[in-house]
Image: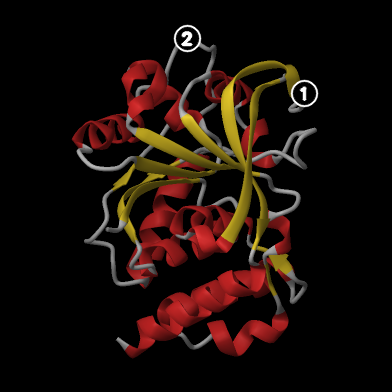
Amino acid sequence: MSVKIIIDTDAKNEIDDQYAITYAVLSKELDVLGFTASHYAKNRSMEKSYDEIIHVLKLLGKEKRYPVFRGAETALRDKKTPADSPAAMFMIEEAQKITEGPLWIVSIGAITNLASAYLIHPGIKDRVKLIWLAGKRWPRGGFTFNDKNDILAAQIIFGSDIDFTLVPVCRPASKLKIYCRDKARIKGKGAIGDYLWRLFIMRRFGFPKPVYDVAAVAAVKSRDLYTAETAPRPAFLDNGKYDHSMTVGEIKVVTGINVEKIRADFFALLDGSIRK
């Protein structure tokens, strides 16, 4: 049975979101229910992410297959007031439909939309599981782009009892990279392959580029693609570090990823999409 997921993404911020969207859509093990747009640290960032998700889906020929929802436009004002967005409501509605197995929220941006959904309807904690790309090296922590863009939302999620898997940005996710030598494996693989390669060249000028977000998708796709440990769940501090003296329940932390296996899987899916 395929795994039901929603991908929450700040797709226009970086180039790795587009790779992650592609990987998820092409993976038959994943049943993507839809996409939600996340904000980042620029004007109209959520709207730009929304447009970019649709653009990537069009290049994949899947724009009519998956719904896309607008999320919060900014970070939360406080820990009690949710951003009542279509994205948050979509998460709640889909969670309530689940009858077998959990709904996975794969967050590769600020966590505002899920934190809002939790504030609106705390009962979703029994129906969803979260995989979030955030934080520096475990167990110390430290700010990365995703958690810094909504500190209050991060504190809500760390303090909640939502089943939570953390994918640290600085090792293991940073080890997953695209290189110049990958050109023949990406460019020419349909409209999406050409676009992914163009993004790489335009943003990195040929230098290796970590595709962090792909690691988060891999962590929900197959247990064979990563290693993890379970630990007491720390508090998330205002400086982005973790306070292990204040714990609530447990957290799963991805400690390693099978870089070559994930890369090979991604390239094989691109090849397969062309053959079809």
Closer to the camera, 194 or 221?
221
Q: Quadrant of residue 27?
A: bottom left
- Give SS at disc 2: loop
Left or right relative to 116: residue 165: right
Residue type marked 1? Asn
Please rate how many residues cluster around mark 1, counting C-alpha atoms within 10 Å: few if below 14, some from 14 to 19, many from 20.
few
Residue type marked 2? Lys
Instruction: Name the spot of residue 166 as percent of width and height, x first.
Output: 60, 40
Residue 80's label in the rendered image is: 2
List the residue tagged with mark 1. Answer: 239
Quadrant of the frame with the C terminus: bottom left
Closer to the camera, 152 or 194?
152
- Whichever of callouts 1 and 2 sits on the residue coming sooner in the sequence is 2
Instruction: Name the spot of residue 268 as percent of width and height, x first.
Output: 47, 82
**Residue at 58% over, 50% down:** 13
Q: Quadrant of residue 152?
A: top right
> Mark 1 to mark 2: distance in Å?
20 Å
**Residue at 54% over, 15% down:** 77
